[in-house]
Image: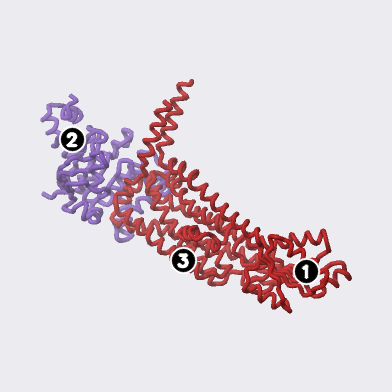
Chain colours: A red, B purple
Amino acid sequence: MLKGLSTIVIKEIKELVRDPKILIGMIIVPLIMFPLMGFAVQTSRQSAEESLKLVPIAVADFDQSSSSRNLTNYIGSQTNLQVTWLNVSTVDDALDFMRDSNATVLIVIPRDFGLNLSTWGKGVVEVFSVFSGKSITEDVGSQVVNAYLDAYNSRWEPLALKQSSIVKGEPVNVDPQILFGLTFSQVFIMPFTILMLLIFAMQIAATSVAMEKEEKTLETLLTVPVSRFTILAGKLAGSVVVALVGAAAYLVGFVYYFSSFSFVTDTGGVSVDLAALGLMPSSLGYVLIGASLFVSLLSALALAVVLSAFADDVRGAQSLVGFLYVLFILPMFFMMFSDINTLPLPLRILLLAIPYTHPMLAAKASITGDYLLAGLGVVYVSLFTVVVLYLAARLFATEKILTMKLKFGWFRRGKKQVVEELQ
Amino acid sequence: MTLAVETKKLRKLFGPIKALDELSFQVEEGEIYGLIGPNGAGKTTCLRIISTLILPTSGSATVFDHNVVKEATEIRKLITYLPEEAGAYKNLSGLEYLEFMAKFSTRNKKETESIIDNAAKISGLGSRLNDKVKTYSKGMKRRLLVARALMTRPRLAVLDEPTSGLDVLHSFHVRGIIKEYVKQHGVTVLLSSHNMLEVEFLCDKVALVNKGRIIAEGTPDELKTKNKVSNLEEAFAKVVGLA
C-alpha cells in the first residue's frame, strides 16, 4: 500500500510543480499579493494612528463664563488635541477660520452655555465636523472630540451636543455621522463593485481565445481568408459589447445607489438635498465614471485576450487572468482605507500607474469634485489600452498565438531536484 | 504542369527540436498527395507551414506560386485546412457552423446557401445538421469538418489525418468523400496519415517522411515495386531499415 501511495504522491508532485500556472500561483499569492495587501492595510492603519495622535481642532467660547472655562480647560488638558483657541465674535467668523485651517472639528460654546446649565441643567455645545468624503478615517477627529465631550458629560456637567457638518467650507445642519455613513458606503462598496465588474468581464474575455484552443477551432479559424487583425477585432468587439453592457449596468446601479442617498434627514427632522450640498455626482461626474470604466474594461479585456493566448484551455486562461487581480485588489484596498493624496509619494505613483486605480478614483472624484485627476486618468487608461491592443494585434499576427506557452525551466529544474530527493 | 505546392529545403526548428530537416517535394494540381510517416515525423508541421499557420525557419514553400511567408493572405483564399484534432463550435448547430465558415468565402446569401447545400450532401448528416455540434459523435463531427474543408471547392485542401480516430464506417465514408469529390471537382489534396492502407487507397503520389526528411517518394505502386513488397507499410518499414 505504501509503495502505491508513494508512487501516486510523487506523480502528483511532479505534475503540480511542472504546471507553470500553479507555479505562478505559488509565487505570486504568498510572496507578492499578501505582503502588498498587508502593506496597504498597514499604511492605512498608520495614517489613521497618526491622525489619532494629534487631532487639530478649533474652539470658540462665546460664553466666557466659569462653566464654559471649565469645559475649555478640560478640552485644553487633552494631550492628543491640538487646540486653536479662536477669538472671534460670531459663529460665521469661526467657520471662516475653518475654511483655511487644517482643523477637522470646530467646537462652539454659545453665549448662554453657563445660563442653560444653571437654568435647564444642560449646556448646549455645537460641534461642527469637517466632511470631505475622501477617506474612511476622516471621522477620526470627530469621534475623538465626541468621546471627550461624552466623558465630560458623564463625569462633570451635563452637555447637549448639537452636531453639524462643514461641507466644502459651508455649515450644513446634518449629523456628520450620516455623511460619514455615506462615505463608508462610497469607499467600500464602489471599489468593490468595480473590482467585481472587472473580474467578471475578464473571465469572459479570457475564454474567447482559450475556448478556441480547447475546442480545437483556433487553427481552422486562423486559416480562413480574413486578416488576423479582423479576427482579433471581432473578438474584441464582442468583448466591447460585454464592456458596454457591464459599464451601463454599473452606471444604472450607481445612479440608483446614489438616489437612495439623495435626501437625508437633518438633525432637526428636515430633509436635506445632498445634491444641493455638492455631495452627489454631477452629470460630468457620471460621464467621467462611465468613460473611465469603459476604457478600463476595454484594456482589461484586451489584456485578458493576450494572457489567454498563453494557456491551452479555459481553466488555464482563467488561472492566468486571475494573477492580474492584484492590479485590482491593491488599488481597492488603498481606496477603501486611505485618501490617495495622503499616501507616500512612491506609493501614490505606483497606484496611479496601475490603470485600474483610475475608475475607482473617478468614482471617488465624482463626490469630491476632483475632476482633473479623473479626466487625466481616463487619458492615461486610454493610452494604456492602445498599447495593450497593439500588443494583442502583434500577437495575433504571428504563430505565437498557437505556440506560445508559459515556460519556467529554471524553476522546474529546481523542483526536479526536490522530487529526486523525495524518491 | 501547374504546381499546387512546392517546398524547397524546408526546415523548422522548435528550440532545439528539428521538426523539419530540408524537406522538399512538389504536388501537382488535381493530385491527391500523401505525406506518410510515424508520429513526430514532421507531417503536421509541414502542413501547418503550407496552411500559413506557422513560419518555416529556413527554406521555402509556395502554394500556387504564392510564398507562404510573404503572401499568406493570398494563400488563405485558395486553401482550406483540416487540422488533425479540429473541433467545431459546440454550441452552434452543424448548419450554423457551416454557415459561419462559408461566409468567409462567399459574397452573398445565395452563394452561402449553395455552399451549405453542398456541404450537407458531402457530410451525409441529414437532419442531424440541425442539432448542436456538442451532441455529435466523433465520427459525425469529423464528417462535418471534412464537409467544411471541401464545401467551398478550394484549389487546395490540406487534410491532416482526415480519418484519425474514426471507426471503420465513418473512415469508409470520409475516404469515399475525399476520393469522389476531389476527382469530380479537380480539387488538389495534400493529406497526412499514418494509415498506410488509407494512403494507398486515396493517394496518387506519396512521400514517406521520417525525422523531418522525405526518405522515399512515388506512386504507391512504384514504392511497392521498388521495395519488392506487397503494401506501403512494408515499404516504409524497409526504407527506414526496420525490415
A313 or B208, which is in the foreground? A313
Tag 2: residue type? Leu
**Picture quadrant where residue B45 is located:** top left
Name the amino acid, label 3: Val
**Among numbered discs 3 and 1, the one appearing first in the sequence:** 1
Q: Residue at x 52, y 53 (%)?
A: A329
Give the percent coordinates (x, y) of residue A83.
69, 67
In this view, the residue in front, A264 or B214, is: A264
Disc 2 vs disc 3: which is toward the camera?
3
Front residue of A405/A360: it is: A360
Contact, mark 3 vs mark 1 (Cβ under 8 Å): no
- Which is more foreground, mark 1 or mark 2? 1
Image quadrant assignment for residue A18: top left
* Secondary-structure class at tag 3: helix
Mark 2 to mark 3: distance in Å?
60 Å
Whole-number angstrom distance, CA of label 1 to CA of label 2? 99 Å
Mark 1 lies on residue: A125
Q: Report the residue marked by disc 3.
A: A378
Q: Residues within 10 Å of mark 1 (few under 14, many from 20)?
A: some
| Residue B177 visible in the displayed image | no
Q: Is residue B204 left or right of residue A394?
A: left
The picture places residue B108, in percent across and down from the top left corner, at 31, 61
Give the residue drawn at x 69%, y 65%.
A176
Q: How many marks?
A: 3
Q: Which residue is mark 2?
A: B208
Looking at the rendered structure, the secondary structure element under dot 1 is strand
Question: Same subunit under labels 1 and 2?
Answer: no
- In the displayed structure, does residue B10 sit left or right of residue A287? left
Say which amino acid is labelled 1: Val
* Residue B40 locus on image (x, y percent): 26, 36
